[in-house]
Amino acid sequence: MPSPVGHGGWTSTGTILVLFILLVIITRTFI
């Protein structure tokens, strides 16, 4: 989806954010 901020920065930040959230969820699940 297009964003007014810009494709590159938004997608990279969004990907890192999603991976971080998934990591937290997996960590809480196993611990």
Image (cartoon, rainbow, N blue to C red):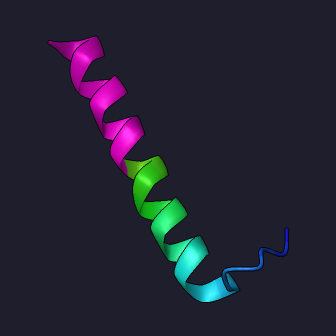
Question: Which residue: 22% across, 25% down?
Answer: 27
Which percent across, then down, holds residue 16?
A: 41, 61
Q: Is residue 17 above or below residue 16?
A: above
Q: Is residue 15 above or below residue 29?
A: below
Question: Which residue: 14% across, 12% down?
Answer: 31
Which percent across, then down, holds residue 2?
A: 84, 75
Which range of residues does the magenta coloring cover? 20-31
Question: Which residue: 43% across, 53% down?
Answer: 17
Q: Quadrant of the N terminus?
A: bottom right
Q: Is residue 23 left or right of residue 21?
A: left
Which percent across, then down, holds residue 30?
A: 22, 15
Q: Is residue 26 above or below residue 2?
A: above
Residue 10 in which image quadrant: bottom right
Number of numbered markers: 0
Please tell me whether residue 29 belongs to the stretch shown in magenta.
yes
Q: Is residue 28 above or below residue 5?
A: above
Question: Which residue: 32% across, 26% down?
Answer: 26
